[in-house]
Structures are given as C-alpha cells and as structure tokens.
Image (cartoon, rainbow, N blue to C red):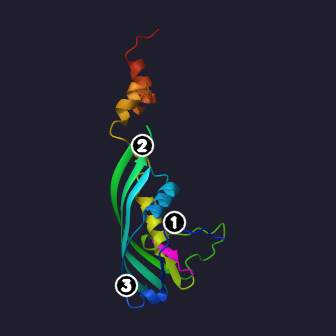
C-alpha cells in the first residue's frame, strides 16, 4: 500500500494529449509536510510550473521547481535560508523498470537519467517536483557564522585537525 504524497498533482495521458501548461503553488499544509519529509526547518514557498505533452510511450514534462527553503546548518543547526530554482525535463514511460538480473551490469546514459515509470495512464507531477526539490537541496548547508561559532566552542577546523597539521607540527621540532 502506497502512502499519499504530500503534494499530489496527477496528470493523465488525456490531460497531456494536446499539451497543457501547469502552474501550481503548494498550500501551507503541503509545504509543512514536504518540509518534514525533507528535513527542512521551513519551506516558505513551493511552486511548480510545467509544460505537459504526450511523447512516444508516455508523457513528457518540462518545467521548473521554485522554492524558498530554510535548512538546518550541518555543523551548528542554525537556519540557512536559500531560494532555489531547479529546472526539470522528465519523461514518464511504460516499461522503464525492466527487470535486470543481479550479475548483469547496465550502463545508463545521460538521456536515461530523467526517465520515470508511467503508472497506467497517469503520472504524479507533484511527487516528481518534490523529488526534484530534494535533489536541489544543499547536502551539507553551512551557516555563514559556522566557522566562528565552532572555533569559539573549541572545535578544530579540518586543516588544524588533519594528518598534515600533525606533520607540520613535527617539522618544526628538533630530533630527540
């Protein structure tokens, strides 16, 4: 049983048959649920704009996700605000998830990276937009004051704590 997505925007083959422009902004409840799922401190704006069209074997969606996010700093947990605009060009096709044996090696070209399975005659563009946002987020956001705060707390920087720092200290000492 699949869970209901936080931001569902179902588009069918019939909707895409003659091309369709979509512009949707998530409501506060959906934004709060998306923020919780993605580990954000806040999601103040989440907008999806797209052109939907039928393509051979499925549906094509080209557009952009725009968001105002607040992520917790990876080092200090302080809020790190960011405005994101991430383009996407997705193709939802039948038979995308063809079974592959465990010892079979597959090569994926850059053209295959944005292929998703077509679920019957429909797609969930909202879920695809949330996934696009998740990929656009900074993996380790840093607050501008993180280095200063960590130094004040006595945490050594990578340069001061690394193996080369220990070698540099040894270089200046006379042999015993």
Along the line of sight, the residue nearer the viewer: 44 or 123: 44
Q: Which circle, 1 or 2, is nearer the viewer?
A: 1
Residue 2 seen from this side: yes
Horizontally, is 114 left or right of 67 in the view? right
Along the line of sight, the residue nearer the viewer: 51 or 44: 44
Q: Nearer the N terminus, badge 1 or badge 3? A: 1
Which residue appears at 46% of the width and 65% of the height?
Answer: 130
Q: Which circle, 1 or 3, is nearer the viewer?
A: 1
Horizontally, is 53 left or right of 37 in the view? left
Report the magenta residues as a range.
113-119
Q: Nearer the N terminus, badge 3 or badge 2? A: 3
Query: How many marks overall?
Result: 3
Residue that mark 1 sits on: 6
Around disc 2, counting alpha carbons within 10 Å, would you say few (fewer than 14), some (14 to 19), or many (20 or more)?
many
Residue 162 place in picture, x, y as percent: 44, 30
Q: CA distance from mark 1 to mark 3?
A: 23 Å
């Amino acid at each position: 049983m699949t869970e209901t997505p936080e931001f569902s925007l179902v588009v069918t083959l019939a909707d895409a048959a003659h091309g369709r422009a979509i512009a949707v902004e998530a409501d506060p409840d959906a934004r709060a649920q998306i923020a919780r799922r993605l580990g954000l401190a806040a999601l103040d704006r989440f907008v999806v704009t797209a052109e939907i069209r039928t393509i051979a074997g499925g549906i094509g969606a080209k557009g952009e996700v725009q968001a105002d996010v607040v992520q917790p700093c990876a080092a200090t947990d302080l809020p790190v605000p960011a405005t994101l605009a991430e383009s996407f060009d997705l193709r939802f096709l039948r038979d995308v998830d063809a079974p592959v044996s465990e010892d079979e090696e597959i090569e994926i070209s850059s053209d295959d990276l944005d292929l998703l399975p077509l679920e019957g005659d429909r797609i969930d563009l909202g879920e695809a937009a949330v996934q696009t946002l998740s990929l656009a987020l900074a993996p380790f956001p840093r607050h501008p004051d993180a280095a200063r705060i960590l130094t004040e707390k006595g945490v050594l920087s990578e340069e001061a704590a690394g193996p080369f720092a220990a070698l540099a200290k040894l270089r200046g000492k006379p042999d015993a």
